Image (cartoon, rainbow, N blue to C red):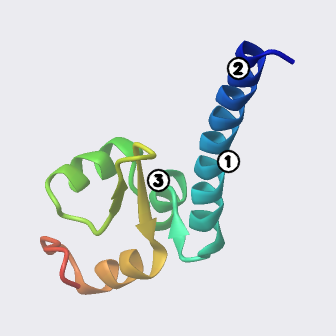
Amino acid sequence: MDLQQLFKKIERLDHIEIKLDRLCKQLELGKADDIIGIDRAAKLIGLSKSTIYSMTSKKKIPFIKRGDLNRLFFSQKALENWLLKGDQKFDGNE
């Protein structure tokens, strides 16, 4: 094996490591039963996904934004508490 082939293999290993890191982060998020995606959040509170997106942009609903995954997540418990409190602006300190 020459030096160029070795560098290609190292580069490939770096790419594999990056993909594994991303998968691990996704699995860590999935381990928390309380953390749900927008589809389950929509079913839980009975609103459309577009309405939920609008509410998150106005900070009217509790949510978690993971920029590295470019997705929205929600705590089921936080959504249930929010529903019980009524229509209030969410300030992120609850």
Residue 45 visible, this orientation:
no
- Mark closest to the chain's N terminus, 3 or 2: 2
User: For mark 2, does the 10 Å Cα neighbourhood hold few (<14), some (14 to 19), or many (20 or more) residues?
Assistant: few
Residue at 61% from the left image edge and 66% from the top image edge: 28
Name the residue rendered at 60%, 56% in the picture.
26
As drawn, the label of residue 8 is 2
Name the side, left or right, on which 52 lies relative to 34.
left
| Any part of residue 36 in sight | yes
Q: Is residue 72 above or below residue 60?
A: above
Q: Position of residue 34 (x, y in %)?
A: 54, 77
Q: How many marks?
A: 3
Label 2: element kind: helix
Pointer 3 residue: 38
Q: Quadrant of residue 84?
A: bottom left
| Label 3 – label 1 distance at C-alpha | 24 Å
Query: x and y percent of residue 78 in the render?
Result: 37, 79
